[in-house]
Amino acid sequence: MNIIKRQVDGKPLTITIEYPYLDEHTKKIINRLEQLNLKICGNKDGKEICISTSDIYYIESVERRTYIYTKSEIYTTSKKLYEIEEDLHGTNIIRISKSCLMNAEKLYCVRQLENSQLEATLDNEERLIVARTYLKEIKRLIQEIM
Amino acid sequence: MKKIIQKTLILAALMIAVVFLVSYIIIGTTEEIMLVFELFVLAFATSIIQYFTEKLACEYRLVNVVCEYLAISIFVLLYGYFVNWFMKSNWWAAFLYVAIVYIPAYFLDIAIVKKDIDFINKKLEEKRKSENENK
């Protein structure tokens, strides 16, 4: 497989896949890219904005409201956390606790706190509590995507 | 190694179940045969209790472990009375047996979690290095 990367100014990110025939490996790559291109809609200042999953850092449910966090913005959505989890099944966004989904692509490190709680630090230095039951799933996904 | 140990334990459980089931069919009920089946029932019930305590788990690991330990010990105590394992004078034996299982399991869990965290952090570090090299 050849990977050709080039910077083209003034154009959106474009990925072209050329293949001699569509085998399982190629299908897997295409599926992965399509998952990365998934969007979910959120509201900010009364406007509906569709956010690419690759821009999402984490999604949290607080007092029956669901918030979508990107690097610097916060959006709300009327969807329940479990509905978003179902919509984003197969992407890098996974459940890390009862009230939170995290984008594993944005994970910087995981550590165990003194009280045995687990804490995930994201690329933007946000810290999230990870339930132990979901640690195996994070490990599996990290293994898969890296 | 972990998978081999898991398979060994599952295989051992199956062998015990089959041997004692055949014995039960051929010679009927004995104390030993009943004890084995009672232990299987206890293991099944314990797994169900663990499943529900995990669902209700809070953020503090120690609190979860203590709650799970108490729930299972109380169940073992009641079940033990039901199948005549314990006398009224040695009711504390249920808590002792469960503690003997739980204390090593707690430390084993801490070691496994540490290993998983180290693995995740190592992979993330490798990813960052490879991204820096590609820049």
Image (cartoon, rainbow, N blue to C red):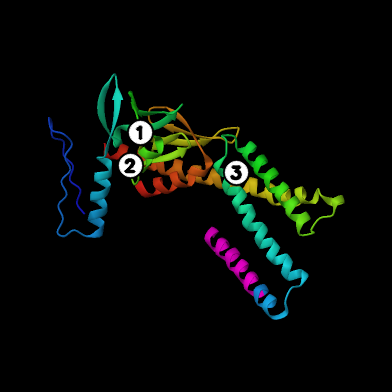
How packed mark 3 is, by other alpha carbons closer than 10 Å (few <14, some 14-19, many 20 or more), is: some
Residue A59 occupies which quadrant of the picture? top left
Residue B44 visible, this orientation: yes
Residue B5 occupies which quadrant of the picture? bottom right
Q: Which residue is mark 1?
A: A79
Q: The disc labelled 2 sits on which kind of residue?
A: Asp
Q: At numbered mark 1, what does the secondary structure look like: helix, strand or loop?
A: loop
Q: Residue furthest top?
A: A45
Q: Quadrant of the N terminus of chain B?
A: bottom right
Q: CA distance from mark 2 to mark 3?
A: 28 Å
Q: Are marks 1 and 2 in contact (CB under 8 Å)?
A: yes
Q: At numbered mark 3, what does the secondary structure look like: helix, strand or loop?
A: helix
Q: Residue at x 57, y 35 (%)?
A: B58
Q: The disc labelled 3 sits on which kind of residue?
A: Thr
Reply yes or no: does residue B10 show up in magenta: yes
Mark 1 or 3, which is nearer the eye?
1
* Magenta-colored span: B1-19
Q: Residue furthest bottom?
A: B26
Q: Residue at x 57, y 48 (%)?
A: B51
Q: Which residue is mark 2?
A: A87
Mark 1 belongs to chain:
A
Residue B118, image x and y in percent? Answer: 49, 43
Q: Quadrant of the C terminus of chain B?
A: top left
Left or right: B35, with B88 as reference point: left
